[in-house]
Image (cartoon, rainbow, N blue to C red):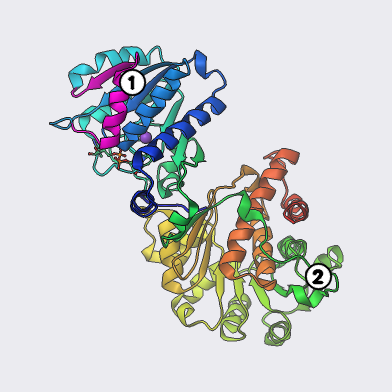
Amino acid sequence: MYLVNRQEMKEIDARAIDQWRFPSLILMENAARSITEALFETYEDLMDRRIIVLCGPGNNGGDGLAVARMLHLKGAKVAVYIVNESSDQKTSIDHGVNREIIDHLSIRVFDIHREGQLRLLKANLNHCDLLIDALFGVGLDRPLSALVTEIIDIANERDLPVVAIDCPSGLNADNGQVEGAVLECTDTLALTLPKVGFYAGRGPDVCGRVQVLDIGIPSEVADSLAVKTSLLTAADAKVKKDKRPADCYKHQFGHVGIIAGSVGMSGAAVLTAQAALRTGAGLVSVLADKRIFHAVSTVMPEAMVRPVQWPSPSALDWLLARANVLCLGPGLGLDEAKEETLRYLLDHGDQPLVLDADGLTLLARLGLDGLKEASRELILTPHPGEFKRLCGESHDPKVSRLEAARAFAEKYRVTLVLKGFQTVVAAADGRAAVNSINSPALATAGAGDVLAGMITALIGQGLSPFEAATTAVALHGQCGRNCADIYGEDSTLAGDLIQEIAKELRRGK
Ligand SMILES: NC(=O)C1=CN([C@@H]2O[C@H](COP(=O)(O)OP(=O)(O)OC[C@H]3O[C@@H](n4cnc5c(N)ncnc54)[C@H](O)[C@@H]3O)[C@@H](O)[C@H]2O)[C@@H](O)CC1
Ligand SMILES: [K+]
């Protein structure tokens, strides 16, 4: 699903109106109908609640007026407050139309132009059971005034459920930044598409549950724009590849080469390899330190395990001659021999290479300057600490994860998987995706090794690095959610995730 900024959303609305010939008032009516339905679905006792709709002067406020009308006509208890400070109190055209309609109904409508008029709102908020936020949507284009800030502060002080129409007021839909105040919402009903700002800066704290509502704009309209950002949802957890033919053989599904594990960290090699096998890899070869060879090979009869004394160019040559994709790093260790191993791999072979965990720390040590000229596709999977190390001095904590990941991937011509809550995947060509399928169950030892194995296996089966990374991230998130249901968030083990890969892949067929 596309994830859009304000300019893209406005362009989609404008094209729907100008090129696809949808009258804007129809879109507003559709929006209001979808929002009203969602409110009834979300709040079963809606008819018993005293509802306040806070409207701004633009089309977001117009949506609010139309929703207030629909709720009123269904018999709900609604009061409307319209905040408009502009000197001529001008509103958008469609807001004006909906104002006229509502003025002919018996709904209580109050105008607020200045601070002296806040007393009634303050009093009514004390007896309110649901606040609908229609102050500003994607049209917020300047810092909030003192009046609006005060209104938002008053509302935030109350312990009220708040439903945002399109976007919480005060949230910059481009980057999640807040200047002054932001309405803290329980639910955000995004119109047509989710906005980037929901997943950056303060966005995750203030949006609550996000639902995306269809308002009748055909999907071709968004397709006609070059939107480069997407939101990963359950649909992305399905592997987009053909079903295995009946007469298939293992060499058709990739040969994954894994360089992982060290004394005390043999499990990392096992988890990476098992995850790759469960994700459909035809063959998996592991180069493992000879001291952990038995530990790795005995628990994993399906993988080919070769004992190695690092550094070992000959073992790497053996692997380079066989594997069609490589993964280096989980539990590998950081000694001089491993540094030499990575240096050798960066200079030899042309298979895509996934660098994870210690592989990333080693890369940060070697320096990133050579990456742009690398003869192979590189996929880096850092957690925030590793990412900071990779960025070095250029790390800027004020830049959102999405933009930081995108800039890094473009600069170094790599696919970057910036892990954490709402993992970001970014490609060298500017595409990026944010994962919406998260689970606290994934915060467990070895979960990263599993993800690295999954990404590597999907590349081995022919997916592009970006496709493989986005699919694996969504699938991994889904497995985390399943495990949270089965074992609980506290008790999920990385190995449990691997069992879930099998169930999810079967379900996705
Ligand atoms: N065809 C469309 O364009 C549709 C738009 N829709 C709604 O319209 C919204 C966008 O409408 P608009 O572009 O009118 O924008 P908004 O209604 O989000 O806000 C713009 C209005 O707020 C004022 N404003 C902006 N920042 C302010 C600030 N900091 N303090 C005080 N006033 C401020 C502007 O002067 C303008 O009057 C969407 O978020 C969505 O809710 C929906 O009705 C669906 C269709
Ligand atoms: K809003």
Q: What is the span of residues highlighted in magenta in the rendered image?
A: 90-114
What is the secondary structure assignment of the residue under circle 2?
loop
User: Is residue 121 something one can see in this rendering?
Assistant: yes
Residue under numbered circle 1: 80
The kind of residue tagged 2 is Pro
What is the secondary structure assignment of the residue under circle 1?
strand
Q: Which mark is residue 245?
A: 2
90, 234: nearer the viewer: 90
Q: Is residue 83 magenta?
A: no
User: Is residue 187 something one can see in this rendering?
Assistant: no
| Residue 485 vertical placement versus 316 (above, below) | above
Q: Position of residue 400 (x, y in %)?
A: 40, 53
Mark sitting earlier along the chain (2/1): 1
Q: CA distance from mark 2 to mark 1?
A: 61 Å
| Residue 391 vertical placement versus 36 (above, below) | below
Query: What quarter of the picture does the C terminus occupy?
Result: bottom right
Within the displayed image, which quadrant is ligand 1 positioned in?
A: top left
Q: Residues within 10 Å of mark 1 (few under 14, many from 20)?
A: many
| Residue 146 vertical placement versus 317 (above, below) | above
Q: Is the C-beta separation of discs 2 and 1 under 8 Å?
A: no
Q: Position of residue 279 (x, y in %)?
A: 73, 62
The kind of residue tagged 1 is Val
